[in-house]
Amino acid sequence: MQNTSSTTRKLVITAVLIAISIVLSIPLNMGPFISLGFIVIGPTIAITIMHVPAIIGAILEGPLVGLVVGGAFGIFSLFLASQQPAGSPNAIFVDPFISVVPRLFIGPLAWAVYVGLKALGMQVRLISSAVAGTLTNTLLVIGAIALRLNVPFLATLASVSVNVVLEVIVAAVIVVAVVSALRGTAGGRSGSSV
Amino acid sequence: MSLELSRNILIGQYIPGATLIHRLDPRTKILCTLSLLLAVSFTRSLSAAVIYLVTILALVGLSRIPITFVLRPFLRGLPVILFFLSFSVLYLSWFQPGGVNLIDWGFIRVTTDALLQAALSLVRLMSILLLVSLPTLTTRITELTHGVELLLQPGARIGLPAHELALVITIALRFVPILTEELERVIKAQASRGGEIGELSWKQPRQIAQSLLPLVVPLFVNAFRRAEELAVAMEARGYLGGRGRTKFIQLHGSWIDVVVTLAMLVFVAGIWYATSGRLL
């Protein structure tokens, strides 16, 4: 599946990953799952996996796909903030410099880490890539909030420190599981696909 | 626990109408929105921001969209925004003193400059919110897609993938209901095997993590399988990219579109020029 990456394939996979980002944000209201991409795991803590499609796109199809998927995720989070908030009141995300610009970097950075660690084992590369992508998302968004609303960066970062750790762990688990599953099924067509 | 996820999708909310705003060419709407968006995002002057906000409110009024409908998310998010802003007022008053000290209790200090900055942030957020809602509320999503493609067309000469971007948007929007249905099926499959997705509380983080993977992994794997099938089908039908393709839907702008676009650009630039370099 890696060698025959045609333009059509890349286009369609980009589109599908964008669709997944959108589906991840559909309100579910099932216990802790506000939506599949937004999960409550503490009295005041909610974590997100909405940036994961961008990381997976970057790992499987390269930095450009990651960039486009990340950008689409940003635009969609802007759109959601402007409609009715799916979970938390996230109206500050209507500012494109908070919602879109930081998200463009998730894919390219995750890809750079994935390619840069070529010497290491596949699991390590996938985990590091997921960590890099997640941290890019958090740090740049917090940075943008600090810049646009004139609040101190470190204090804002401290207020989400628990989220960051949990998001990194969850993102790493999902990226490893999904990429392994895709690499496993797409090549040999062995086993069930559902 | 409701399993009909498709009811919860709110993408592409479009309120039909026959107002001037509705009838404008999507390209006009995109260009006007972008110029206002850039101006309102970067202006450092409160009066300019207020003038832009009034203009945007007038546009919303012209489109006959109920103002309460567009402002609801802003009002709901207001407590959080005000929390951030009060934080920012205290911070700015302390580290960038300027203007008159309104309150000075040692540690806590509030200056007029900081308050003006906070007001600017507030007006800016409200304007941006209205601006990003307006085009989608008054334009069908397919029209917007065509508008984007046509606007990016000149950039195609220098390698900008206009057609490809429009195609990606269309396919993504088409896939949302399909994947939603698939997710619904996976959730039902898990529930039928005793998965307690809806009954978990946040006090069971391990169980939450355990129930997340069986939902997310099939979502990705199924989506990729469908993507691969679609790519093969497209190539089998001779899809070769954007070059030489013709379109079924043609957009026809009129002279009104040209006038509106030019007037908006002149207006935005004029206000920007008149207020640059001033905070108030």
Image: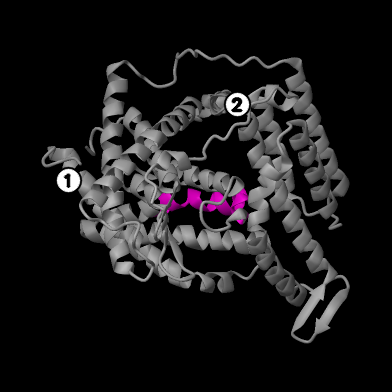
Residue positioned most to the front: B1
Query: Dot 2 falls on which chain?
Result: B
Q: Quadrant of the C terminus of chain A?
A: top left
Q: Position of residue B180 (x, y in %)?
A: 37, 39
Q: Which mark is residue B169?
A: none
Q: Position of residue B220 (x, y in %)?
A: 30, 44
Q: Do pointers 1 and 2 mark residues of a single chain? A: no
Amino acid type, residue under disc 1 in the picture: Gly
- Above or below, comparing residue A4 to residue B253 in the picture: below
Q: Nearer the viewer, residue B157 or B60?
A: B60
| Residue at (59, 69) in percent of width and height | A153
Is residue A126 visible in the rendered image? The answer is no
Give the residue at mark 2: B151
Q: Nearer the viewer, residue B69 or B170?
A: B69
Determine the secondary structure under disc 1.
Answer: helix
Q: Which residues are magenta?
A: A92-109
**Magenta stretch, overall SS:** helix
Amino acid type, residue under disc 2 in the picture: Leu
| Residue at (26, 51) in percent of width and height | B191
Query: Dot 1 falls on which chain?
Result: A
Count neighbours of disc 1 (C-alpha within 10 A) and say few if under 14, some if 14 to 19, many if 20 or more. few
Is residue B96 visible in the rendered image? The answer is yes
Give the residue at mark 1: A184
- Above or below, comparing residue B253 to residue B272 in the picture: above
